[in-house]
Amino acid sequence: MKRPLLKYKACCLIIIVLLFNIQAFCQNPRFKAIAFYTTTVERDHVWFANDALKFFGSLAEKDNFVFDTTTNWSNINYDFLKNYQVVMWLNDFPQTEEERRAFEKYMSAGGAWLGFHVAAYNDKYTKWPWFVDFLGGAVFYTNNWPPLPAKLIVDDTAHPVTTGMPPKYNAPANEWYMWKPNPRLNKDVRVLVTLDTTNYPLGKKDLITQGDVPVVWTNTKYKMLYMNMGHGNKIFTDTTIQNRMFEYAILWLGKK
Ligand code: ZN
């Protein structure tokens, strides 16, 4: 008559082990993200970074991922970066050859990148051809000034980052960048959001009067996403549409 008791004990043990594993699984963060930012750049770009730290910090708690932050860009070395599944540049980009090579290695090894606004700024003085290629060929051409709200077109609601978004929405004030070459011309680029031409002429001092302006895109050769938002302290004020896109962006990049 000992056997049923043994079976009962064995069952209890299995249940305890299972519960322990489920708990461990739930507590493990889904992924680790590291945000690089600079506090000595243009004031409006610092404001954005500060807002982004708060926004992604609370998302990390809600969505169960690690969100680390640093102002030390020399942390862009492979030994540091390899600890993270997502690297974010909030308001700056690496300047030294060493940092640039380390980032190239990280991306080629399957890392993910989320860049905002000035993070993708490049011109003839930047001298980083790999990065231009990484962006799908985009080189900064012009911008509107002052920063203004704008109507945006959601090109692609089939993508995990823009799923469930309306075909158009009004985005909070931003300084919008135009690119030449236009990354849409690259067959590997998938544009998700575009500046609506009904905004034109957009600006007062500096005007965007015509042309196609992609705002959010991914170069499908990499696990990367660029979002042009990132100027001023209004970016995170659209709590229903745009903020959800930011959330989906980091979750998509963090997904294994
Ligand atoms: Zn700006």
Image (cartoon, rainbow, N blue to C red):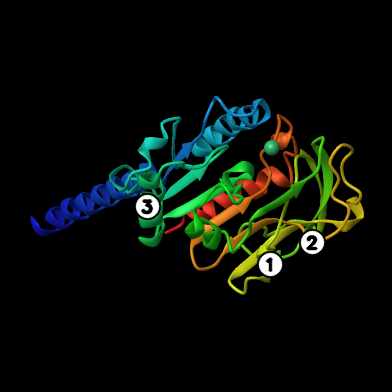
Dot 2, crowdedness within 10 Å: few (<14), some or many (≥20)?
some
Residue for badge 2: 212
Q: Residue at x 31, y 42 (%)?
A: 80
Q: Position of residue 17 (x, y in %)?
A: 23, 49
Q: Residue at x 57, y 29 (%)?
A: 54
Query: What amino acid is labelled 2 in the image?
Result: Asp
Q: Residue 212 occupies which quadrant of the picture?
A: bottom right
First in residue order: circle 2 vs circle 3 = 3
Query: What amino acid is labelled 3 in the image?
Result: Arg
Q: In front here: 243 or 51?
A: 51
Distance between the alpha carbons at the discs numbered 1 and 3: 26 Å
Q: Position of residue 199 (x, y in %)?
A: 89, 50
Dot 3, crowdedness within 10 Å: few (<14), some or many (≥20)?
some
Is 142 rendered above or below residue 70? below
Residue for badge 3: 101
Residue for badge 1: 184
Q: Secondary structure at mark 3?
A: helix
Q: Position of residue 214 (x, y in %)?
A: 72, 58
Q: Residue at x 67, y 60 (%)?
A: 163
Which residue lies most toward the front here?
125
Left or right: 117 in relation to 35: right
Left or right: 182 in relation to 55: right
Q: Residue 7 occupies which quadrant of the picture?
A: bottom left
Q: In front here: 245 or 127?
A: 127
Give the number of the mark in front: 1 or 3.
3
Q: Secondary structure at mark 2?
A: loop
Evaluate if marks 1 and 2 touch, with contact meaning CB atoms under 8 Å apart: yes
Number of numbered discs on residues: 3
